[in-house]
Image (cartoon, rainbow, N blue to C red):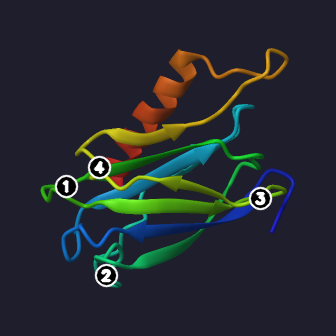
Amino acid sequence: MKTAANCSYLVVISTSCSSPKFTTDKIGITFGDANGNQVYEPRLDDPISRTFEQCSSDTFQIDGACASPICYVYLYRSGAEEGWEPESVKIYGYNSEPITFDFNTSIPNGTWYGYNLCETPSSSYQLSPQKWFMSLVLGSVLSFWL
């Protein structure tokens, strides 16, 4: 669904069979486009519903800024457990083809980890390093409050 300022995304995160049986760590995600449109969800995890189990896929509906085409994704893991290993993240976005980012590696604790495949044309708005860094810092701080 699309409104004036928001779009809905379907995000599918597949957990590797090399991952531990499950994780109780806090998992967050941010993704967006080369024009500065960013979607941020600080908490995807839910120990009650057993998200991020080994050899499984979890689907999330996330609302945020309308980003098209999506060209970057970062995951954030916070917790005492090590070894959670996403296999891939597939994002079905607004007005664009679905995009898959292959991870197949464990996410370090307390760090945004992911991929930036954006090719920003010179005429497009570019994220300044300060704005990007501040967004990540703000997101990290908010994730601890939730």
> Which numbered tag is attached to residue 97?
3
Q: Position of residue 117 (x, y in %)?
A: 60, 36
Q: CA distance from mark 4 to mark 1?
A: 11 Å
Check disc 3 and give the amino acid type. Answer: Glu
Q: Is residue 11 above or below residue 103?
A: below
First along the sequence among labels 4 and 2:
2
Label 4–label 3 contact, CB within 8 A: no
Horizontal arrangement in the rendering, residue 72 relative to residue 119 (left or right): left
- Identify residue type, mark 1: Gly
Residue at 38 percent across and 79 percent down: it is: 56
Residue corresponding to mark 2: 50
Query: In the structure shown, which secondary structural element does the residue marked by tag 1 occupy?
Result: loop
Element type where label 2 sits in the image: loop
Q: Nearer the viewer, residue 98 or 78?
A: 98
Q: Is residue 29 above or below residue 130?
A: below
Answer few, some or many: residues within 10 Å of disc 3's Cα (few below 14, many 20 plus, some between 14 and 19). Answer: few
Helix, strand or loop under label 4: loop
Q: Is residue 125 above or below residue 3?
A: above
Horizontal side, residue 43 vs residue 124: left or right: left
Lower position in the chain sequence, tag 4 or tag 3: 3
Where is residue 94? Give x, y as percent: 79, 58
- Cα–Cα gap, marks 4 and 3: 26 Å
Q: Are marks 4 and 1 in contact (CB under 8 Å)?
A: no
Q: Nearer the viewer, mark 4 or mark 3?
A: 3
- Residue 122 higher or lower than 43, as above or below: above
Q: Residues within 10 Å of mark 2 (few under 14, many from 20)?
A: few
Q: Nearer the viewer, residue 23 or 64?
A: 23
